[in-house]
Structure formats: structure tokens, C-alpha cells
Amino acid sequence: MYWNKLIETMGREEMTELQTKRLRDTVQRVYRQVPFYRNKMKAVGVLPEDITELDDVRKLPFITKQEMRDNYPYGLFAVPLTEIVRIHASSGTTGKPTVVGYTKQDIDIWAEVTARAFSYSGASKNSCIQIAYGYGLFTGGLGAHYGAELLGASVIPVSTGNTARQIMLMKDFGTTVLACTPSYALFIADTIREMGLDLSEFKLQAGVFGAEPWSENMRREIEARLGIKALDIYGLSEIIGPGVACDCLCQDGLHISEDHFYPEIINPVTGEVLPDGEKGELVITTITKEGMPMVRYRTRDLTMLNRSVCDCGRTLIRMGKVLGRSDDMLIIRGINVFPSQVESVLLSIGNTSPHYQLIVDREDNLDILTVLVEMNEEMFSDEVRGLEGLEQKIKAALSNVLQISAKVRLVSPKSIERSEGKAKRVIDNRNI
Ligand code: DLL
């Protein structure tokens, strides 16, 4: 049942001891090897010797995505390039990508944590895992691939795209576990229906979905449409890629592989560390990474931590489903709005498809939020009165949940652009 029982069920005291030792080693290493960290530590007057227990991590300064960009491409590497065996990069919205480098050991650890993640879904060497995350500079494809291979599963490295072929392979090869973004999983489900295929012709049992925020309602929708258990896998290139955390079949929070990634939650405005259970920004320190260690990386992802033992028996700390990113959070007329809140409302109402987009404009200094909602086929053929009623219903529910009014526009089926990777949920036309 467990992939790495020792770690997955380790007692808190023992885990703290392991983390403390690894944290100390990491801090010493970055101080010695990476001028950027040395300078930052010197600036706040902290030396590696000052880090003796786990909570001392709070003495260390944060690192941000901007600082990674400032050190483009290799400024944060802690080993010579000859020791780096893989480089990934994520494209930013502006300018240069952020670059990450892995040593051989880093790749092995990445495979270990991703294998763990797959195993949480019940996958094993008997599984057939179809990887429909993009292969390339994006960490999704290769990250999941190495984990699935380490697990001993039969891996189908199909990457994204060509959805009809994707589905044909899924059926013919007897795929049992699908790995892709949740929005792509939904697109695949839509396409299976359009192709007139019967789910009983498939062997699919579970999906390991991530790389973008998705709501609990979206999870239920995917589970119902594909007849599977849908699990949430979290990760980011800066830390390693997929596999930082993943939920188990209890679906009650994502187990963080905290023997490699030390998590904290902070108030995103003040930087103050928050207690377990409080919502804030996730900060991660890698405590085993060699190529490019990250000390107190501000992920911008909003979540909370839970240290209680899970019903599955795992003791690894759990993070809540990511609500959104602090930088994806829209501030509309002063109110914080997350795309995932809109998603949840739409799915609870029904009669629409879970494809939607938020458009924000500014007219006469006033923010206007318009939510485009795709109708499903049945609704589309309904009479106008029914549509108006639906529009009003969504509008009322949105204003109730978001605390601001939004315009709602029902659009015809399939008119919102589909994505094979991360979905584009927001178009912000304000120049701010
Ligand atoms: O998306 C790595 C990944 C690949 C994770 C495949 C899971 C599966 P980046 O492109 O660097 O890496 O994007 C990282 O995506 O900071 C979150 O904002 C978001 N994200 C990733 N997983 C989840 C998730 C990959 N399960 C950024 N829920 C992160 C919500 C997620 N957001």
C-alpha cells in the first residue's frame, strides 16, 4: 500500500530530526556555494551556524521568482554545470524564463517523490500510466514519466495534444491511470462522449491531475464523467516539478514529501509565519536538492497546512487544495476574486459546461467583471426564457459567493478555447 513506508508513516519527532539535519546541510551548502544566498544572509546578519533547529529557518530571508529571473540563467546553481544532468525552464509572462537545473541525485529524488504520488492513487507496477502532460522544458511530462517508470508501471509517454489519438491509445492500450491537467481531463471526457465511445470500453481507474488550480466541484465532475478517482498532484518547477505533494484516496489534503520539501505558510503581506490551519502563502525550502537548492521560496500559492495523521495512515503533513495564486487573485472593486470560486459556483448550478473565462475591463474607472459561461448542448437548444433564467441564476449565485456583481454571458458550446495544458481562465484588460 505504501511506496516508502518508513517516510510516509514516520513519527513527527523523527521527521523533525531528519528535516533539521537536512536544513542545516542545505544552508551551509548554499552559503558556501551560491554568492546570492551568501549575500542575502550577510545582509540580515545570519550565519549558517545560527541555524540549529527547524524553526531557525524563520531567520532566513525569502527568495522570490523575480530574484530567480535576476540570476538568469545559472546564477543560483550550487554545483558546476558539469554536475547538472537536466535543465528545465518555465516561460514567464514577461521576458526570460526561469531556469532550473538538476543533478543526477536530484533526478532520482524527483522520481522517488513522483512515484510516491502515483502510488497514493493506488497505482503500482501493474498499472498502465498515460502521461498527457507536455514533455519538454515544462516539468510535467518528464517529471511524471520518471516517477511512473520508477514505480514499475507501463508508461505511455503520449504528451499533450491530438486528443482523438490520445483516446484511441487510452482504450486500446488499456490505460488505468491518466496524468494531465484537470482542464485537459475534462476536454478528454467531452471528446470521448463526442466520439460516441462507451466508458466500459476503457480500463481507466484513476487520474493524477495538477499543474493548475481546480475546485472540489471540478473534481466531482471529472470523476463522474470519466468514472474514476481524481487525485490532485501539486508541484512547481522552482522546487522540483510535479510531486511536491499529492493527495491520497482519502482526498483530504495533499501529502507533502516533507523529507525533501520543508513547508511554511506565511501572511503574503507581512511575511509573518502563520500557524497550522490558517490560510496563507506556501513557502518551501528544499532540504535535499543539490543542483539548485531553494531556501524559503515564495510560491505565491495560497493554501494551509494540517499536521494531523490522515485516515490512510500517512503522517506526512498535508496541504489544502490550492485555492489560487496570490498573483492570479483578481482584485475587482477592491474585492479578492479567485477563478476557482467562479468554477465552483458554475459547477454547483449545472446546465453549463465547466468551461468558463473571466474577463475584467475598466470603464470610467470602474472594474467590470464579465463571466463567459459555456452552455451544454441541451441548454443551448432550450428556448430563450430558459437561458435568461439560467443567466439570472448564475448571476445571483456569483454575487452571493464573490460579494460583487458580475455580468454573465452564456456562450455556445465549444466557443471557449480549449487547452491541452494549463487553461487560460482570466483575461484582464485593465491597464494596471
Ligand atoms: O505545473 C508542475 C506540475 C506539473 C505540477 C504537473 C503538477 C502536475 P510550473 O509550470 O512551474 O510547474 O507551475 C507551478 O502551477 O506554483 C501553482 O500555481 C500551479 N499548480 C501546480 N500544481 C497545482 C495544483 C508545474 N495541483 C504552478 N493545484 C504552481 C493548483 C497548481 N495549482
Image: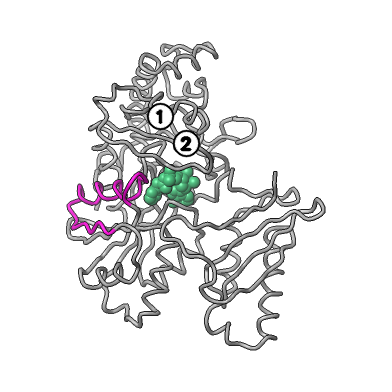
For the point 29% across and 40% down, the residue is: 110
Q: Residue at the front extreme?
A: 95
From mark 2 to mark 1, how far is it between C-alphas? Answer: 9 Å
| Type of amino acid at the residue the image marks with label 2 | Lys
Looking at the picture, how far across and down is residue 44, in whole percent?
55, 14
Residue 207, picture quadrant: bottom left
- Residue 1 on image: x %, y %: 24, 53
- The image shows residue 348, relative to residue 20, as above or below, that is below
Element type where label 2 sits in the image = loop
On the question of residue 246 being in view, the answer is no
Q: Are marks 2 and 1 in contact (CB under 8 Å)?
A: yes
Horizontal side, residue 76 vs residue 352: left or right: left
Q: Nearer the viewer, residue 159 or 120?
A: 159
Q: Report the residue marked by disc 1.
A: 73
Q: Which residue lies at the image location 60% right of the left edge and 30% below the top edge? A: 272
| SS type, badge 1 | loop
Q: Is residue 137 magenta?
A: yes
Ligand 1 within 8 Å of the CB at mark 1: no
Quadrant that contains the C terminus: top right
Which residue is at the front of the view, 18 or 106?
A: 106
Instruction: Give whichever of discs 2 and 1 has the lower sequence position.
Output: 1
Across and down, in percent, residue 315 comes to 36, 43
The amino acid on which the numbered mark 1 sits, given as a three-letter code, is: Pro
The vertical placement of 195 against 144, above or below, is below
Name the residue located 53 percent from the left edge and 36 percent from the top edge. 265
What span is colored magenta in the figure?
Answer: 135-158
Residue 96 has which mark?
A: 2
Q: Quadrant of residue 112?
A: top left
- At 29% from the left edge and 21% from the top edge, which residue is drawn? 80
Would you call the spot at circle 1 few (<14 residues within 10 Å), some (14-19), or many (20 or more)? Answer: some
